[in-house]
């Protein structure tokens, strides 16, 4: 399968949100990645429903919504109404993960689970068949622009093996510190979806950077 690119709106210019959404519409990006932070599960607050609805109004590609919030079950139908196509919850906040996954699917969305850098991949073994997506956090969630954690490569390989073994069709998404320097290696390890915030929006030419991520051109940053 061809890998997907999901630019993270967190790094966009919120005073020019329509312009940035149109840029993604006109690029080779596949999804919009939408980061929702509650200031409780993570030490930052991003944005909520009004902003999400504003993005949805212009977005012509699926909305991949990453919930970094406690009690995600309370808001599943609200996120559906705000336009989410894929809804990802964090493993670390779900006492009844299987029930949460079913509730997301019952609303007609694809269901994803995100793992913090310290959370082992093997904990998903008994639900892997039920998951449309696993998001491996390659930074500690809460902020854009952080340094990629290299142990992610091992986690991607381990998760890929688990998915293959289970004959599941779960997609592997990588979120945090992804750019043209590590995209190819991640896809070689088994990644299917690359989230990219700063590397796209801080680039001189975001459309070209998205095309490079899509082509897996390796461009190593000078330090
Ligand atoms: C981090 C978010 C990421 C973030 C990625 O908590 O989940 O989606 O926006 O940003 P970069 O690509 O800048 O690391
Ligand atoms: Zn995210």
Image: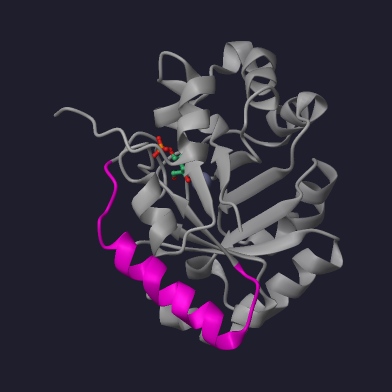
Q: Where does the magenta region start and end?
A: 147-170
Instruction: State yes or no: residue 165 in magenta.
Output: yes
Q: Decide: is 130 above or below 6.
A: below
Residue 80 in the image: state x and y as whole percent: 81, 50
Q: Nearer the viewer, residue 51 or 152?
A: 152
User: Which residue is pictured at 59% across the width and 52% down the height?
Assistant: 2
Along the line of sight, which residue is nearer the eye, 7 or 84? 7
Instruction: State left or right for residue 218 relative to residue 68.
Output: left
Would you say the magenta stretch is mainly helix, strand or loop? helix
Where is residue 141 shown, x and y percent of the image? 41, 49
- Note whether residue 138 is visible: no
Picture residue at 52% right of the left edge, 39% below the top:
214
Relative side of 27 to 144, left or right:
right
Picture layout, residue 124 above or below residue 207? below
Decide: is 118 above or below 54: below
Residue 150 visible in the current orientation: yes
- The colour scheme of the drawn protein is one colour
User: Total of numbered circles in the picture?
Assistant: 0
Q: Residue at x 58, y 18 (%)?
A: 14
Q: Residue at x 72, y 36 (%)?
A: 49
Q: Quadrant of the N terminus?
A: bottom right
Q: Is residue 85 left or right of residue 16?
A: right
Residue lying farthest to the left in this orientation: 223
Q: Hey, which quadrant is residue 105 in on the image?
A: bottom right
The quadrant of the rendering that contains the C terminus is: top left
Q: Is residue 52 magenta?
A: no
| Residue 150 screen position, x and y as percent | 25, 56
């Amino acid at each position: 399968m061809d890998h997907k690119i999901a630019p993270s709106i967190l790094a966009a210019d919120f005073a020019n949100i329509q312009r940035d959404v149109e840029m993604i519409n006109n690029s080779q990006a596949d999804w919009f990645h939408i980061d929702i932070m509650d200031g409780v599960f993570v030490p930052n607050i991003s944005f909520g429903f009004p902003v999400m609805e504003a993005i949805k109004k212009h977005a012509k590609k699926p909305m991949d919504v990453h919930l970094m919030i406690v009690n995600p079950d309370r808001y599943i139908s609200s996120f559906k109404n705000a336009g989410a196509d894929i809804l990802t919850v964090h493993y670390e906040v779900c006492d009844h993960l299987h029930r949460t996954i079913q509730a997301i699917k019952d609303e007609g969305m694809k269901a994803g689970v995100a793992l913090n850098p310290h959370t082992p991949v093997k904990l998903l073994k008994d639900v892997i068949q039920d998951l449309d997506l696993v998001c491996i956090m390659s930074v500690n969630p809460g902020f854009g622009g952080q340094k990629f954690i290299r142990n992610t490569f091992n986690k991607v390989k381990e998760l890929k093996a688990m998915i293959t073994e289970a004959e599941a069709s779960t997609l592997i998404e990588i979120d945090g510190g992804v750019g043209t320097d590590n995209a190819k290696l991640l896809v070689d390890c088994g990644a299917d979806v690359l989230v990219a915030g700063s590397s796209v929006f801080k680039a001189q030419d975001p459309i070209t950077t998205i095309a490079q991520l899509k082509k897996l051109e390796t461009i190593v940053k000078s330090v």
